[in-house]
Image: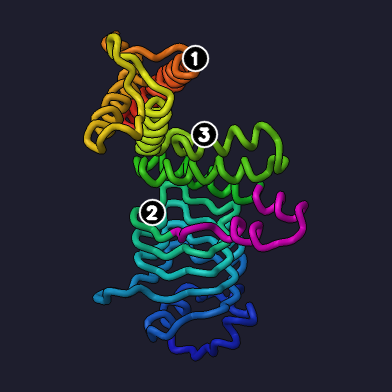
């Protein structure tokens, strides 16, 4: 086919109904010039080959209207689709390996059976960014609902393909979008935020380790100033002692904080009467809960 088609024709949408749209688009792509703002809504592009063979960069099909377009079984390796509307587009069983889908509208997009390894999704999806930018609370909630739906869809697709690390990130984003739909000062929102900070909704075991280290360190300081018993001796900060002696006392407080947090309780060091006992009991409660939760999070992460 030797038909000349201008970019204005692609942008106007008149090419969608053309009988040879796939061949013409493949020819246009081979010019290696960026294909920007093409209107291909509801176009039948099933099986199209948009792979830039022999090149380290893919073709550019950016900022395009691809609403409800059919890319099933298409070859889109390294294809740059950034900024395009892929709303309800069908990419079932397409090859999207190493494609760029950042800043795209992915609402309702179908990725069933598609090859999506090493796809660039961007730091945040379009609806998430728009929700943060709008001043209208109702509009923001609607965008967050859409973002939650998109992340849920991506999480399920990546889970089915065994891309568990990516699925975990999508799940964390999905829960964050759900949290942002809750009333600002509601208890549920605060609890959800704490779970996110504490363990990334079960996807970040390392955060539990960081939380544990912080708690142990804080209580070590509290014990250092409130005092603990070692036999008949009270171990606590004393300005009359040397720096070395105070350091030894702090290390003893750190040791006591560790065994209290882990609920080992060797008994060689005990809290003094008063606030130290309250602190020890409180730290033991935090430690028991945290260690149990860490096991759950770690097992979940490792057994996927």
How far from the left and from the top, in percent, is residue 142? 71, 51
Tell whether 252 sits left or right of 226: left
Residue at x 75% of width, y 55% of height = 139
Q: Which mark is residue 128?
A: none
Q: Nearer the viewer, mark 3 or mark 1?
A: 1
Residue 20 visible, this angle: yes
Say which quarter of the image contains residue 289: top left
Mark 1 closeness class: few <14, some 14–19, many ≥20 residues within 10 Å: few
Instruction: Judge whether residue 133 is colored magenta.
Output: yes
Q: Which residue is mark 3?
A: 195
- Name the chief secondary structure element in magenta: helix
Counting residues from the start of the chain, the first of labels 3 and 1 encountered is: 3
Q: Which residue is mark 2?
A: 116
Q: Nearer the viewer, mark 2 or mark 3?
A: 3
Report the span colored magenta. 121-144
Q: Secondary structure at mark 1?
A: loop
Q: Secondary structure at mark 3?
A: helix
Q: Which residue is mark 1?
A: 274
From the viewer's perspective, is residue 89 above or below residue 146? Answer: below
How far from the left and from the top, in percent, is residue 38? 56, 78
Residue at x 50% of width, y 74% of height = 62
Tell whether 302 sits left or right of 133: left
């Amino acid at each position: 086919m030797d038909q000349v088609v201008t970019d204005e024709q692609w942008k106007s949408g008149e090419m969608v109904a053309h009988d040879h749209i796939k061949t013409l688009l493949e020819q246009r792509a081979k010019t290696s010039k960026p294909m920007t703002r093409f209107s291909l809504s509801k176009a039948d592009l099933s099986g199209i080959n948009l792979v830039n063979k022999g090149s380290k960069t893919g073709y550019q099909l950016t900022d395009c209207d691809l609403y409800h377009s059919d890319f099933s079984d298409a070859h889109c390796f390294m294809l740059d689709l950034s900024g395009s509307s892929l709303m309800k587009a069908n990419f079932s069983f397409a090859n999207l390996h190493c494609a760029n889908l950042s800043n795209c509208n992915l609402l309702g997009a179908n990725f069933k059976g598609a090859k999506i390894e090493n796809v660039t999704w961007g730091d945040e999806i379009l609806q998430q960014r728009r929700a943060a930018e709008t001043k209208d609370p109702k509009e923001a909630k609607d965008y967050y609902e859409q973002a939650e739906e998109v992340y849920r869809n991506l999480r399920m697709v990546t889970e089915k393909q065994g891309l568990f690390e990516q699925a975990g990130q999508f799940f964390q984003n999905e829960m964050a979008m759900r949290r942002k739909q809750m009333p600002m000062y509601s208890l549920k929102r605060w609890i959800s935020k704490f779970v996110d900070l504490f363990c990334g909704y079960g996807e970040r075991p390392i955060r539990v380790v960081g939380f544990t280290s912080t708690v142990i360190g804080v209580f070590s300081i509290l014990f250092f100033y409130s005092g603990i018993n070692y036999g008949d001796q009270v171990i606590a900060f004393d300005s009359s002692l040397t720096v070395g002696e105070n350091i030894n006392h702090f290390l003893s407080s750190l040791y006591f904080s560790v065994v209290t947090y882990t609920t080992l309780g060797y008994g060689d060091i005990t809290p003094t009467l008063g606030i130290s006992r309250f602190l020890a009991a409180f730290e033991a409660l935090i430690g028991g809960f945290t260690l149990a939760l860490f096991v759950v999070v770690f097992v979940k992460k490792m057994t996927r």
